[in-house]
Image (cartoon, rainbow, N blue to C red):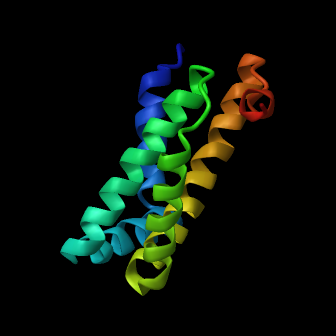
Amino acid sequence: MAVNVYDTAHLLASQLKETEEYKEFHRLKTEAYEDGTNKALLDELKRLQFKMQAKAASGEKPDEEEMQKLMRITSLLQLNQDASAYLLAEFRFQKLIADIYKILGDVAGIDIDALTQS
């Protein structure tokens, strides 16, 4: 019997939604985004993170002004209990995803740790 890896991936995705990490992440995200200021700051944080990751992936150095802005936004968000709790929950859920990706990378012979080192 052939294994359909896409079906397995969909099963994994549905199982991820049942984890405590996901449930907590989703609940806290909803709470954090209810506040308009939090939403604006979190959206800007995500935008800056993505932009900086894209630059790093292309070999560019991060812009100093953007780094400062990222640090200011992060500091502001840490002062807000809802936003701070959401960011911590997001980190825990991303760690779970990274662990799964590492397992998949090991099967494929991809050294995930080497990809993240500069």
Residue 93 in which image quadrant:
bottom right
Pick the quarter of the image with the N terminus.
top right
* Residue 34 seen: no
| Residue 55 in the image, given as x and y percentages of width and height | 53, 28
Residue at screen point 44% across, 37% down:
51
| Residue 41 in the image, given as x and y percentages of width and height | 33, 65
| Residue 77 in the image, given as x and y percentages of width and height | 43, 74
Q: Nearer the viewer, residue 62 or 116?
A: 62
Residue 32 in which image quadrant:
bottom left
Q: Nearer the viewer, residue 14 or 102?
A: 102
Label count reads 0
Residue at screen point 35% across, 62% down:
42
Residue 113 versus residue 35 in the image, above or below: above
Q: Is residue 41 left or right of residue 108?
A: left
In the picture as drawn, the residue positioned furthest to the top comes out as 2
Residue 62 in which image quadrant:
top right
| Residue 88 in the image, given as x and y percentages of width and height | 54, 70
Residue 8 versus residue 27 in the image, above or below: above
* Residue 43 seen: yes
Q: Is residue 86 left or right of residue 118?
A: left
Residue at screen point 52% across, 56% down:
68
Residue at screen point 62% across, 31% down:
61
Q: Nearer the viewer, residue 83 or 29?
A: 83
Q: Nearer the viewer, residue 66 or 3?
A: 66
